[in-house]
Amino acid sequence: MRWLKGVVLAVVTLIVLLLGMLFAVRNQQTVPLDVIWAELPPASLSLWLLSTLVVGVLLGMVAMSGLYLRLRTTLMRTRHDNQQQRKELDRLRVQEFKETP
């Protein structure tokens, strides 16, 4: 089953790469990009769109890293508490067996 997942992932990756190459080839018109504070030099439309996608993905990853770290810390703390409770439960079970005549 693991190999099937790898094959499907490889096929999807190949399709996305082919679509990206087709997109880049079909959008070769040069356009200047005018942002609020500056006008960037003319470049191909596909370059501007793909670079915007990359910047957006990176900003999204940075924005979500705080939440990820907070959840990871909570998970580690919960696992530690769970381990402490299991030790306490085992200690109480052993103590109960020792007290029974």
Image (spheres, grey):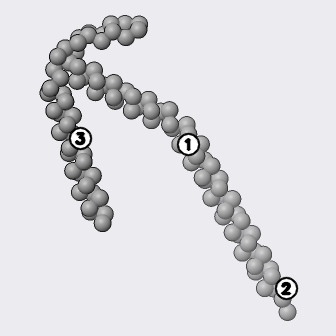
Q: Is residue 41 left or right of residue 68?
A: left
Q: Quadrant of the C terminus?
A: bottom right
Relative to 58, is 90 above or below? below
| Tag 3 near tag 2, CB within 8 Å | no
Q: Pointer 2: what residue? A: 99
Q: Amino acid at mark 1?
A: Leu
| Picture disc at residue 69 | 1
Q: Amino acid at mark 2?
A: Glu
Please report whichever mark, 3 or 1, sits nearer to the chain's N-terminal start. 3
Q: Pointer 3: what residue? A: 16
Occupied quadrant, residue 4? bottom left
Relative to 74, is 101 above or below? below
Q: Residue at x 23, y 57 (%)?
A: 7
| Picture disc at residue 14 | none
Q: Is residue 65 left or right of residue 24?
A: right
Task: Determine whether the residue tagged by mark 2 lies in a helix, strand or loop.
Answer: helix
**Residue 98 image offset from top left, x and y in percent:** 81, 85
Residue furthest out toward the top: 38
Q: Nearer the viewer, residue 86 or 24?
A: 24
**Residue 41 image offset from top left, x and y in percent:** 26, 9
Q: CA distance from mark 3 to mark 1?
A: 30 Å
Q: Residue at x 58, y 46 (%)?
A: 71
Q: Amino acid at mark 3?
A: Val
Occupied quadrant, residue 18? top left
Residue furthest out toward the bottom: 101
Q: Residue at x 23, y 41 (%)?
A: 16
Task: Determine whether the residue tagged by mark 3 lies in a helix, strand or loop.
Answer: helix
Occupied quadrant, residue 95? bottom right
